[in-house]
Image: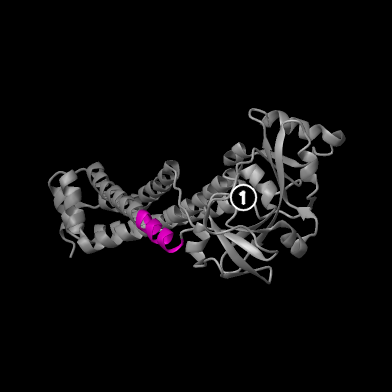
Amino acid sequence: MVKLIIGQISHHPIRTLLCVLMIGVGLLTGLVLKGLANGVLSEKIKRTEGIGADLMVQPPHSSYLLGMGENVMPDKMAAKLEEVPGVVAATPVATSTSFTNRFESVFGIDSSSFERVSGPFHFVDGSSFQGPYSALVDDVYVKTHHVSVGSTLNILDHQFYVVGVVEHGKGSRVFVPLMTLQDLLAPGKCSIVFLKTQPDQTQAVQSRLKEIAGGAMKPYQITPLRELTSLISTSSIFGLQQFLNVIVILAGIISFLVIFLGLYVQVLAQTRDIGVLRALGATRFYLVSMFLGQAFLLCAMGGAVALGMYEATKAIVVAAYPGLTFLLPWHSAAWALVVAGISTAMGSAYPAFVAARSETVVALSYE
């Protein structure tokens, strides 16, 4: 039967190629969106962890995605928190999101306190802030936006001059002086305070923070940065997981329609061949198995093509936009293939049934 299945598929190469490509493209859409969503979130987590802080203090109900929160905490809170036993250093950070050119978060930092928490910047070019409207960008931002030392950035309708390029991995891709960003957004306010604690004191400090000032800090989000991986995912962002599920279901529907149309046309085209097989003693179960085998072979070929196109798409996108990353867990790829397999079984059921119920005499006389 295997030779017969392969022979039937190879006998119509154009139709087989079109079926495989359509299944592959349907699956590719889900794989690319899933990989891109996971990759972007994973990269943001790594950049946040790369700050080197142990705890992150935010206002109540803030997003764990930095740059999405409001600047409502007084920056003087950092000095107060630095007095808590076990805290080595604290730094206030104001954040904003720039929609100029591309979606980017901007950090307003106090250089001295930020480096006490995070360690010194490693400069690729240029130097640190040289004025209120100077900016630092990381090396990935340079590749993505084609800027260099001396270039200007439009942030909140103000011109900032790039004075330094630093290695990526410290939370944001763009850094400006804290007081400048506060003057533009909310004077004296910040959205995050990063804390560096003594070794093995993170959990103890977290508990102490909730008790200071008579428990005034209890409503605040006090998050250990090592827990971000479990807190930030596609399911933690409202609507994103549902959107990805819809895309996967649409890919399954495409696979269903492609398999159904391809096999139904094949059943009609092979009516006489089916009659010959029935005359030679082929059972209905044999015919059903043959057409289901063809369907699942097409699905497997489409899945392999989808994975190959995913890797090619990833390489092209990352080359064009270095700031984007892809991460496709094996279970996500497996889930997409399972959906394709289920749709294949559903799409091939009716054509296989039509083939199996063919009467020998009628099939042999078909023109």
Q: In the current view of this chain or complex, which residue is farthest to the right? A: 214
* Number of numbered labels in the structure image: 1
Above or below for 213 versus 343: above
Instruction: Please name the residue that numbered disc 1 is placed on.
Output: 237
- Element on which disc 1 rests: loop
Q: Position of residue 322 (x, y in %)?
A: 46, 59
Q: Residue at x 16, y 48 (%)?
A: 4
Q: In the rendered image, is residue 131 in sight?
A: yes
Horizontal side of 31 relative to 277 (left or right) equals right
Horizontal side of 140 relative to 279 (left or right) equals right
Q: In the current view of this chain or complex, which residue is farthest to the left? A: 280
Can residue 313 be found in the magenta stretch? yes
Q: Residue at x 80, y 59 (%)?
A: 187
Task: Say which of 120 and 180 sits in front.
Answer: 120
Can residue 325 be found in the magenta stretch? no
Horizontal side of 106 relative to 71 (left or right) equals left
Q: Position of residue 156 (x, y in %)?
A: 69, 68
Magenta residues, start to end: 310-321
Give the residue type at disc 1.
Ile
**Where's the N terminus, which quadrant?**
top left
**Where's the C terminus, which quadrant?**
bottom left
Q: Position of residue 258 (x, y in %)?
A: 35, 59
Task: Say which of 319 and 309 sits in front.
Answer: 319
Q: Position of residue 23 (x, y in %)?
A: 35, 57
Q: What type of secondary structure mainly makes up the magenta span?
A: helix
